[in-house]
Amino acid sequence: MFDADHAFSGQLKIGASDSVGNHVVPGLLNQFRQQSQHFSQSVVISNSRLICQKLLDYELDIGLIEGKSHHPELVAHQFSHDQMCIIAAPHIAISQQTQCVFSDLEQSQWVLREAGSGSREFFLRTIAPHIEAWHEVFELNTTEALINSVAAGLGLGCLSTLAAQYAINDGRVTQLQLPYNNNTLNMQRPFWLVVHKDKYHSPLLTSFISFCHQWGNT
């Protein structure tokens, strides 16, 4: 992929949504630097909607996000995926159940990320349609604040297992298990690589895109 005789030039401006930026990009960039010997990258972390807006404004070269953009000016390709989970405070009743059903979530209270985030989009598309009545008690713009609010017993949360794993391992929150049509609920969520359709693909950008797809398939 990387020609030893070719030195990439210029800075690569990367935008990443919260889970991808905090838990995927550091390792991905470290491997890219080792293989390409290109060390000039900048990373902006925000929610998926704002990253897409920065791509539309040509402020970024590429976006790595959780929520797929349907904007006609942007081109999106899946490059990897993660698993989502539902978390609760260990001391509340539902956390004591070995397995839950959706009826257990009726009248439940939720702490959600802000509009435009991939985690909120996943909840509204995948979880909420199975619950007749639920209530949003807090809308927060950071994952850590969401985890802390759930741990305090303010409500349930839906987020990436990558983001929740340390709090789960530490016993601060409990991961709920839900069946779906006699099988496990599909909690997999794609990660998307997004570029402006009119963006010039320099050798550096072309190689980084190829690397992301290769990385996601390993």
Image (cartoon, rainbow, N blue to C red):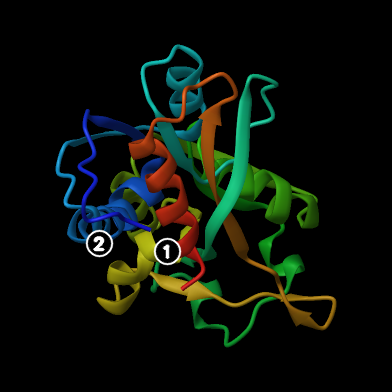
Q: Position of residue 68 (x, y in %)?
A: 62, 39
Q: Give the number of the disc on residue 113.
A: none
- Rendered position, 180 above or below 81: below
- From the viewer's perspective, tell me whether residue 137 is left or right of residue 39: right
Q: CA distance from mark 1 to mark 2?
A: 9 Å
Query: Considering depth in this image, is 152 or 78 the residue closer to the camera?
Result: 78
Q: Residues within 10 Å of mark 1 (few under 14, many from 20)?
A: some
Residue 89 x %, y %: 40, 66
Q: Which residue is mark 2?
A: 31
Total numbered badges shown on the rendered structure = 2
In percent of the image, x 53 and y 36: which residue is there?
194
Helix, strand or loop status at disc 2: helix
Residue 98 visible somewhere in the drawing: yes
Image coordinates of residue 1 in percent, x first then y, are 38, 58
Q: Who comes first in sequence, dot 1 or dot 2?
A: 2
Q: In the visual, does 85 lie left or right of 147?
A: right
Q: Position of residue 16 (x, y in %)?
A: 38, 39
Residue at point 14%, 44% (across, down): 39
Amino acid under disc 1: Trp
Q: Residue at x 49, y 34 (%)?
A: 48
The residue lying furthest to the top in this view is 57
Frontmost residue, 32 versus 188 = 32
Instruction: Return the residue nearer the eye: 106 or 123.
Output: 123
Circle 1/circle 2 CB separation < 8 Å: yes
Q: Secondary structure at mark 1?
A: helix
Q: Which amino acid does the dot numbered 2 rest on?
A: Gln
> Mark on residue 215?
1
Which residue sits at x=68%, y=44%? Answer: 124
Q: Is residue 123 above or below residue 59?
A: below
The answer to whether any part of residue 116 appears in the image is no
Considering every residue shown, the one lying at the far right of the view is 181
